[in-house]
Image: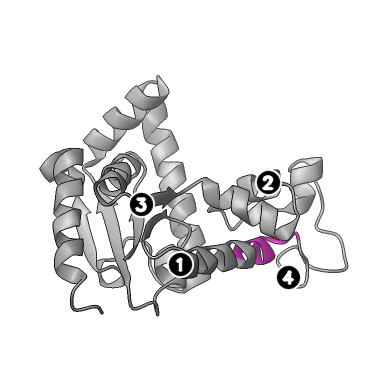
């Protein structure tokens, strides 16, 4: 079973995924995807880190800062430019498909994996949300910052993820119809959320999609 988990910042999705992975004895792919994409493409991992879940990646800005002009020639968003955001997304998508073919079971976090693997019969997609107050407290405690700073980062991070997802999938990030299960971790806690997802996956597994 390939489990893809999308989540709002501060919802505890990463922690829940680790509990689920421990239950099944399977791998979790999150930042590891960046390393694999760099290895497969031959590009430095910093390109993928800079573009990670952000469709506004600019190679010129990456090199020269935000004052860089667009210039002429191959467009930065062109698929023909190996350093464009679109090309980096394709490389990462290929890595996600390779993982799904190579491993009988695993968890993949974010990066439009639910859309990329939408036609894989053994795939189940999850979206984890949480009440904003809980998300702010969790994020602030994790990063050692104030609640106000955490709120700002959450709002910007979620907006970036939504823009990335909506652009590359032509779907709406977080919309229930796009996932097999949507769950609010504030209702059950992180452990309870993981347990509920495990129950869902166990029920989902025998019949397929």
Are there few (<14), some (14-19), or many (20+) residues within 10 Å of tag 4? few
Q: CA distance from mark 2 to mark 1?
A: 21 Å
* Numbered badge on residue 45: 2
* Numbered badge on residue 78: 4
Left or right of 49, for residue 118: left
Specify which label sits upstream in the sequence, 2 or 4.
2
> In the rendered image, which quarter is residue 206 located in?
bottom left
Q: Nearer the viewer, mark 3 or mark 2?
A: 3
Q: Nearer the viewer, mark 2 or mark 4?
A: 2
Specify which label sits upstream in the sequence, 3 or 4.
3
Give yes or no for residue 152 being in the magenta stretch.
Answer: no
Span highlighted in magenta in the image:
83-89
Which residue does the numbered mark 1 point to in the structure image?
100
* Numbered badge on residue 26: 3
Q: Identify the residue at image location x=74%, y=47%.
A: 44
| Element carrying mark 3 | loop
Q: Where 12 sits versus 205, above or below?
A: above
| Element carrying mark 4 | loop
């Amino acid at each position: 079973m390939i489990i893809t988990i999308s989540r709002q910042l501060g919802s505890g999705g990463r922690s829940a995924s680790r509990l689920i992975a421990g239950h099944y004895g399977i791998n979790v792919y999150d930042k590891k995807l960046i390393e694999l994409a760099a290895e497969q493409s031959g590009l430095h991992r910093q390109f993928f880190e800079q573009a990670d879940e952000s469709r506004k990646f600019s190679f010129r800005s990456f090199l020269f800062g935000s004052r860089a002009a667009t210039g002429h020639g191959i467009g930065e968003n062109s698929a023909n430019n190996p350093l464009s955001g679109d090309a980096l997304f394709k490389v990462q998508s290929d890595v996600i498909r390779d993982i799904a073919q190579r491993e009988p079971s695993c968890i993949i976090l974010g990066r439009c994996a639910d859309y990329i693997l939408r036609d894989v019969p053994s795939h189940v997609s999850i979206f984890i949300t949480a009440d904003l107050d809980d998300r702010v407290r969790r994020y602030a405690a994790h990063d050692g910052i104030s609640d106000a700073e955490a709120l700002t980062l959450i709002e910007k991070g979620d907006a970036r993820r939504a823009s990335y997802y909506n652009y590359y999938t032509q779907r709406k990030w977080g919309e229930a119809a796009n996932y097999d299960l949507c769950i609010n971790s504030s209702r059950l806690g992180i452990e309870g959320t993981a347990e509920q997802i495990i129950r869902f996956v166990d029920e989902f597994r025998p019949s397929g999609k």
